[in-house]
Amino acid sequence: MTQKLRPGDMIGVLGSGQLGRMIAMAAARLGLRTHIYCPDPGPAFDVCAQFTVAAYDDEEALAAFADSVGVVSYEFENVPAKTAAFLAARRPVRPGARALATSQDRFAEKTFLNGIGVATAPFAAVDSIDDLRAAVEQLGRPSILKTRRMGYDGKGQILIRETQDLGEAFQAVGCAPSILEGFVPFAREVSVIGARGLDGSFAAYDVCENEHEDHILAHTMVPARVSEAAALAATDMAGHIAAELDYVGVITVEMFLVEDGMEQRIVVNEIAPRVHNSGHWTLDGAVTSQFEQHVRAICGWPLGSPRRHGRIEMRNLIGAQGNDWERLLSQPGLCLHLYGKHEARPRRKMGHWTKVTPEG
Ligand SMILES: Nc1ncnc2c1ncn2[C@@H]1O[C@H](COP(=O)(O)OP(=O)(O)O)[C@@H](O)[C@H]1O
Ligand SMILES: [Mg+2]
């Protein structure tokens, strides 16, 4: 199996959303072509050399896709394990099966993290209402019930407050296999976006500070307001996690910053085995964007510099905010990115803008 690709080669990406689109655009800049595979057409189809619309269990289509590319990657972590295994038998899948299995299941993820010495919220598996009662007894209120799989943007989770009826809470997550997490009284949410190369090299961007509105990322600021020691600890943690997963590609680690008096502590929330919304600023604000970095890593190429060009502000355009594009275009110093989605549905990510302010 080829380990390294060459300019002119084709990369394969599962998923046709804006992340796949920006990966394909970064690949094109480096002389690579992209084949997007997805059951539903999406914004990535507009910018790729080839696309396939087929189900993730269509083995004929998957085989043809694998034959056409030198490496397979993905823009979302819920790639079915069977699909990944089928493709991995034909082409390198980067990041690999271990990263996927770990990040797809919140219980496996937190068990893995604690096992390598990384702190998370306290948690317990919940497979029944009796488990939930016992877990709430153990972890107290408030706590958060989350489905083990398929959650995103706050979907599949419910806050267990003092007055919350537990039967209703378990119903609210569809009685699906879940975990209960102790509530982390965080001061801020941050993320570390790093990349691990085929040769084991690791490069991380400065720590990002993230604000959510209605469980969707609204705003990212870099550098984050964290102490130097906490930033170093956070970055080391991401490198450690990537090494333990034998990871190749861009990895994102979402974290909580907890303040105990003067001291700042990092608690890991979740791992995304992919480029991440909190790293979109790197397109305009860093020497190498997260998308290019991901392409470099999965192709077995040297990683680029993650150095920042200045202080960063990134804002997402959600739903109707995307209609504001003309006004945003006339703002000097704003770098506008639109994803080419035709309908501005509520909660839909339509684009983002970045402002880079050079540091003195
Ligand atoms: N244990 C926790 N304690 C406090 N807040 C939490 C906890 N878990 C999640 N949250 C809040 O909910 C948000 C979404 O949770 P997360 O586990 O990241 O799910 P998703 O997969 O939907 O992003 C987090 O960004 C954070 O604001
Ligand atoms: Mg999250």
Image: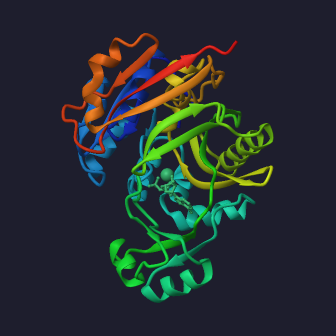
* Residue situated in front as seen by the camera: 316 or 340: 316
Give coordinates of residue 277: x percent, y percent: 46, 37
Q: In this view, does 221 lie above or below 233?
A: above
Residue at the spot 80% in from the left edge and 41% down from the top edge: 229
Q: Relative to the observer, which residue lies in front, 319 or 90?
A: 319
In terms of depth relative to the viewer, which is nearer, 311 or 300? 311
Q: Quadrant of residue 217?
A: top left
Looking at the picture, tell me which residue is in the foreground, 137 or 123.
137
Q: Quadrant of residue 327?
A: top left
Return the x and y of residue 104 as percentages of the image width and height: 48, 58
Q: Which residue is drawn at 64% across and 36% down?
A: 224
Seen at 34% across and 31% down, the residue is 35
> Can you see residue 3?
no
In the depicted structure, whether residue 49 falls above or below residue 238: above
Color encoding of the figure: rainbow
Residue 274 at what x, y percent from top left?
50, 41
**Does 13 sit above or below residue 77?**
above
Q: Residue at x 44, y 16 (%)?
A: 334
Please say if 302 is above or below 228. above
- Give the left or right position of residue 86, taking residue 286 as reference: left
Image quadrant occupied by the C terminus: top right
